[in-house]
Image (tube, rainbow, N blue to C red):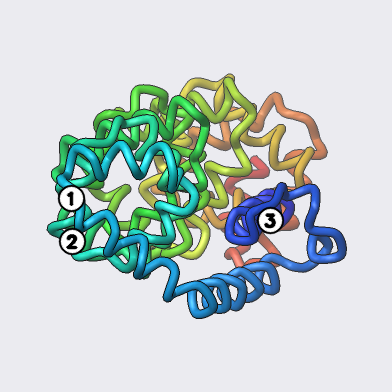
């Protein structure tokens, strides 16, 4: 998981710096927290150094009729600079301009838009427009960018976006990259068990178990318990897929946490799948359960 999160932070930092992630040099070897800190420093320095330019461009677009301003923005400012200029625009002005810009252009603007500085604009954007842009970002595989906007959008708009996502696997990809566990918990709480179950099936089909398990790591016992029971409710193939991923990618601590939070019926289901499973799986799960302080009774229940 750390590798996936590091790569996400490399991409975010590279976009702030205006380069490819492969051009970060020694920075590429930094830990996730170090990359996040470097991104914050770079963003603040860039904004502070060029704020005068951003303000002038924002003023220039305000002097033109909205239609001409949209053409000027597309032809001369471009999406990358537009994302940085947006923070100097009044929400009313930005919304009027966004209404005249094509969805693909707005999606490109999002790649360099700072949700923290442009929060008022993002929150004022009509839900239908946000959904259209989100679907374009999804088509482009920009799951990291979509996750960055989770904190800036209202619960209702986030729910509309999630409802519009037609690929259950993308729910995992986006959820994995949401930095605020509190926000993530609110989002998942709004999804029914059927939708979450489809995401778990997708985790098996598309080798996304690391994302599925790590996504809820650090959330409440209630949410983790719900997801754990949903894993146990899936087909035997899906459950075996989770165990296989745990073995291959050292995810046993997360699997042990899930088992400890399961209902008795769910644990019985897991025990039945383990009856014919590899002995290594049983031993690894029992060891992880012991490390996390599980009772002898619970460990014995799964060893039977």
Q: Could one spot residue 228 in this view of the protein? A: no
Q: Is residue 168 left or right of residue 25?
A: left
Mark 1 neighbour class, 10 Å CA radius: few under 14, some 14 to 19, many 20 or more: some
Q: Which residue is mark 3?
A: 10
Q: Residue 217, relative to residue 277: is it above or below?
A: below
Q: Residue at x 20, y 50 (%)?
A: 64
Q: Residue at x 31, y 36 (%)?
A: 71
Going from N to C along the chain, the mark reached first, 3 or 1, is 3
**Disc 2 and disc 1 in contact, CB within 8 angstroms:** yes
Q: Which residue is mark 2?
A: 91
Query: Depth check: 264 or 54 in front?
Result: 54
Q: Position of residue 164 (x, y in %)?
A: 27, 29
Q: Residue at x 64, y 29 (%)?
A: 207
Residue that sits furthest to the right in the current view: 26
Q: Which residue is mark 1?
A: 95
Q: Position of residue 250 (x, y in %)?
A: 76, 49
């Amino acid at each position: 998981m750390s590798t996936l999160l590091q790569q996400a932070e490399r991409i975010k930092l590279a976009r702030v710096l205006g380069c490819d992630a492969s051009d970060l040099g020694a920075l590429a070897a930094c830990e996730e927290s170090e990359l996040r800190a470097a991104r914050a420093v770079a963003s603040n320095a860039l904004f502070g150094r060029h704020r005068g330019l951003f303000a002038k461009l924002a003023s220039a677009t305000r002097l033109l009729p909205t239609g001409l301003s949209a053409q000027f923005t597309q032809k001369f400012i471009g999406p990358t600079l537009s994302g940085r200029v947006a923070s100097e625009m009044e929400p009313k002005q930005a919304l009027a301009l966004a209404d005249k810009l094509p969805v693909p252009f707005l999606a490109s603007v999002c790649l360099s838009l700072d949700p923290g500085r442009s929060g008022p604009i993002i929150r004022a954007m009509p839900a239908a427009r946000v959904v259209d842009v989100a679907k374009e970002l999804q088509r482009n595989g920009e799951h990291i960018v979509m996750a960055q906007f989770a904190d800036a959008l209202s619960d209702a708009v986030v729910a509309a976006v999630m409802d519009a996502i037609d690929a259950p696997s993308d729910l995992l990809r986006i959820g994995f990259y949401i930095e605020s566990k509190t926000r993530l918990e609110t989002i998942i709480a709004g999804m029914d068990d059927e939708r979450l179950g489809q995401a778990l099936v997708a985790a098996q089909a598309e080798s996304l178990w690391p994302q599925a398990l790590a996504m809820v790591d650090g959330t409440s016992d209630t949410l983790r318990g719900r997801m754990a029971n949903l894993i146990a409710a899936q087909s035997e193939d899906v459950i075996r897929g989770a165990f296989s991923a745990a073995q291959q990618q050292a995810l046993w601590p997360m699997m042990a946490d899930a088992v400890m939070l399961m209902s008795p019926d769910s644990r019985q289901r897991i025990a039945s799948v383990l009856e014919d499973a590899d002995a290594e799986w049983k031993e690894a799960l029992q060891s992880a359960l012991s490390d996390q302080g599980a009772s002898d009774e619970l460990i014995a229940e799964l060893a039977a």
